């Protein structure tokens, strides 16, 4: 095989994936006139070019053997998106998948459904052995599509995509023939405690995160950069923390007051051992929120989520011997003191605490 089947037609639960055809003209016209940008590269920018594109242009990729462009058609016969295979190397057995969804139909899981359906078709009908998917590191919805479709995080290509606002990092995901897909990644879920909401970081959190990280006491107790700026905060909140999650190492939450929405802490899981269902928690409380028990409340909420939802068996917490406030957080949350790791943080000893499911109240 050196080209994709021109009769290709894939049916999923809610969609039909098929080649674009001449009677899609009115559907494409509505998209072009509205200025929506989700059709494959090379799609017409004005209505006069639609007929030629549907008869010739959109099919050139398939005829060349390098890939294929497909329309996503819903039950009401609307074009709700497009999905493509491209950069196909038949000899090497690899291809890449990309997609776009109509702005009015986003958030309904169409992209995930289409990627799953097309991926299954590729492995069932061709000899290709690997499908790659790339997404901007700051494009949360596309990252979630890759995860939900069973693709495995493989790494980051730094500044690999040049857009109008400058270069962006690209996350590379892969799916191999016969692979089940990566399950060892914490999902983004909001957690609620009596006073707090734990959620993903947003750009609005960056100033408060930066102020917290640059605070004198935070600087004393952590190894954060001593010249911490909003650039550091933005990179951590919007890029580094997400890369850490995708690698399976852990997850980070911004903690805000439910009543006011004010940022009060950052809490993260790190050093996760999926085989043993064990991980470690760390936190950083904003100067204006200290002494209110927020860190302990957030940590306990995370522990219940870990043990109850993900079957974890151990949550570890380490605090410097001299950091009595952090030790009190651990004790109030029900952690058990296990011992001291000598020189665990440079020249300072660390007290080791743990929490297991039976410790929860």
Image (spheres, rainbow, N blue to C red):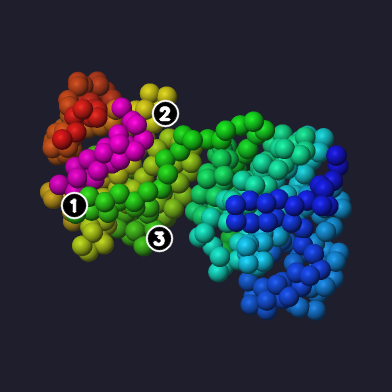
Question: Which residues make up the magenta segment?
Answer: 293-313
* Residue at (67% x, 59% y) in the render: 72
**Helix, strand or loop status at disc 1:** loop
What numbered label is drawn on residue 203? 3
Counting other residues with Cα less than 10 Å from the Cα at mark 2, is it few (<14), some (14-19), or many (20 or more)? some
Label located before the other in sequence (1 or 2):
1
Relative to the observer, which residue lies in front, 71 or 332?
Answer: 71
Write down the quadrant of residue 260 in the picture.
Answer: bottom left
Is 304 included in the stretch rendered in magenta? yes
Which quarter of the image is occupied by the C terminus? top left
Structural distance between the alpha carbons of marks 1 and 2: 29 Å
* Residue at (15% x, 47% y) in the render: 293
Counting other residues with Cα less than 10 Å from the Cα at mark 3, is it few (<14), some (14-19), or many (20 or more)? few
Which quarter of the image is occupied by the N terminus? top right
Q: Is residue 301 visible?
A: yes
* Residue at (63% x, 38% y) in the render: 175
| Dot 1 and dot 2 residues touching (CB under 8 Å) | no
**Helix, strand or loop status at disc 3:** helix
What numbered label is drawn on residue 194? 1
Judge whether 137 appears above or below 249 on screen: below
Label located before the other in sequence (3 or 2):
3
The residue that disc 2 covers is: 274
Write down the quadrant of residue 38 in the picture.
Answer: bottom right
Label located before the other in sequence (3 or 1):
1
């Amino acid at each position: 095989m050196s080209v994709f089947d021109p009769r290709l037609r894939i049916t999923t639960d809610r969609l039909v994936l098929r080649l674009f055809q001449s009677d899609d003209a009115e559907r494409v016209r509505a998209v072009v006139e509205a200025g929506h940008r989700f059709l494959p590269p090379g799609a017409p920018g004005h209505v006069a070019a639609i007929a030629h594109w549907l008869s010739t242009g959109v099919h050139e990729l398939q005829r060349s053997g390098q890939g294929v462009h497909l329309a996503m058609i819903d039950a009401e016969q609307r074009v709700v998106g497009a999905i493509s295979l491209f950069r196909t190397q038949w000899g090497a057995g690899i291809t890449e998948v990309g997609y776009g969804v109509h702005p009015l139909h986003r958030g309904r899981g169409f992209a995930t459904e289409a990627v799953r359906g097309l991926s299954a078709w590729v492995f069932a009908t061709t000899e290709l052995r690997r499908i790659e998917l790339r997404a901007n590191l700051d494009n949360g919805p596309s990252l979630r599509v890759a995860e939900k479709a069973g693709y495995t995080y493989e790494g980051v290509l730094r500044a690999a995509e040049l857009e109008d606002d400058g270069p962006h990092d690209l996350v590379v995901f892969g799916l191999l023939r016969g692979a089940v897909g990566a399950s060892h990644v914490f999902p983004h879920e909001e957690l609620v405690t009596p006073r707090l909401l734990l959620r993903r970081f947003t750009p609005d959190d960056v100033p408060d995160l930066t102020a917290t990280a640059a605070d004198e006491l935070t600087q004393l107790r952590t190894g954060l950069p001593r010249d911490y700026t909003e650039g550091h905060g933005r990179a951590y909140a919007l890029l580094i923390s997400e890369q850490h999650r995708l690698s399976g190492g852990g997850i980070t939450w911004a903690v805000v007051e439910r009543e006011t929405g004010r940022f009060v802490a950052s809490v993260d899981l790190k050093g996760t051992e999926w085989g043993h269902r064990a991980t470690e928690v760390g936190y950083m409380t904003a100067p204006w929120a200290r002494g209110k028990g927020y860190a302990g409340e957030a940590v306990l909420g995370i522990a219940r989520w870990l043990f109850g939802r993900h079957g974890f068996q151990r949550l570890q917490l380490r605090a410097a011997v001299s950091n009595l406030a952090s030790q009190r957080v651990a004790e109030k949350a029900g952690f058990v003191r296990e011992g001291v790791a000598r020189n665990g943080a440079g020249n300072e000893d660390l007290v080791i605490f743990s929490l297991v499911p039976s410790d929860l109240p």
